[in-house]
Every structure is written in C-alpha cells, then in structure tokens.
Image (tube, rainbow, N blue to C red):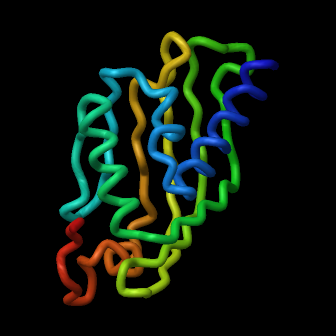
Amino acid sequence: MIGNWLHTMKARAAFAHFGRHDLEAFSASWAEDVVFVYPGPTSWAGRFAGKKAMKGWIQRYMDYFPRIEFAVKRICVENPFGLRFNVVAAEWDVAVTNRDGKDFTYGGITVFHIEQARVVLATDYIFCTPEYREALGEGGGGRQATAS
C-alpha cells in the first residue's frame, strides 16, 4: 500500500505547487519526454509533447491566472503497491482569478501515467461549463486568452 500513499502525497503536493506558481517544483517529477493533453473547445486545448512544451503551457496558465487554488477532492491509484509504474487519477475543483480580477471556479480530473517513477503522460478531463470557457477568455463573447 506504500504506492497508494506515495502517489497520493505526490499528487496533492503537485497541485499545491501549481497553486503557488512554483513551476520548477510542479514539474520536477515529469519525464523529459512527458506528454500533456488538455481537452476542450478552446485555444488552450492541445497535445503538448516534451517537458519544455508542457512547462510552456503551464507557465501560460500561471501568467493568465495570478490566483490558482486547487481543492483536490479524490485521488485514485490503480496499483496500491506500484511505486515506479502506476496510473493516478485526481478529481479537483479550481478557483482562479484572471488578470482582470474576475473569479471563476470549474472542475476536472487529471490522469497521470507513471513509468520509472516519472510522469510520462498527463491528461486533463475538464467539466466544460460556460464558466470554464469564460475563465479561459473564450466564453460569452469574451476575448481570446493570451499570455503577455
């Protein structure tokens, strides 16, 4: 059961690092060839291959939202004994404030695939609500989300 405990603690810590805008700590356990998949009908969506591309997407998000507060609701670990190879799913809500001072809340699930104790694939599944689209600057006639 140590795998369950370890991966649960690492996932919670990763979301905390993300909320503190600590990109280096957040990405420390990612493989160099990590793939990050972000879904949805927005310009933010895509498949980002490599740690540099993933970090670029995360930095864009951090720049766009000065306040990011994750509330991790549940974490499920596929193999409770797996330390080096596993799949971890985290269900979360996030409260964000954009650069214009507008507050939003939306939720999702992130699934992490771990090989050799490194994240090699992370896929977000977002509960695509009108508030989610508006938060990213693409709902209700809002402006396109861009980092400056």
How far across and how far down the image is residue 44, in percent?
A: 24, 59
Q: Residue at x 19, y 83 (%)?
A: 143
Please tell me which residue lies in front, 8 or 128.
8
Residue 62 location in percent, x, y?
Answer: 40, 60
Q: Report the residue at 41% width, 69% height from top.
A: 65
**Picture coordinates of residue 73, whole percent (x, y):** 69, 56
Q: As displayed, is residue 116 above or below residue 22?
A: above
Between 136 and 86, the residue placed more toward the observer is 136
On screen, 92 above or below 87?
Answer: below
**On the rendered structure, is 79 left or right of 110?**
right
Residue 7 position by quadrant: top right
102 to the left or right of 51: right
Quadrant of the rendered structure where residue 100 is? bottom left
State the residue at coordinates (43%, 51%): 125
Vertical arrangement, residue 67 with respect to residue 112, above or below? below
Q: Position of residue 12 (x, y in %)?
A: 67, 44
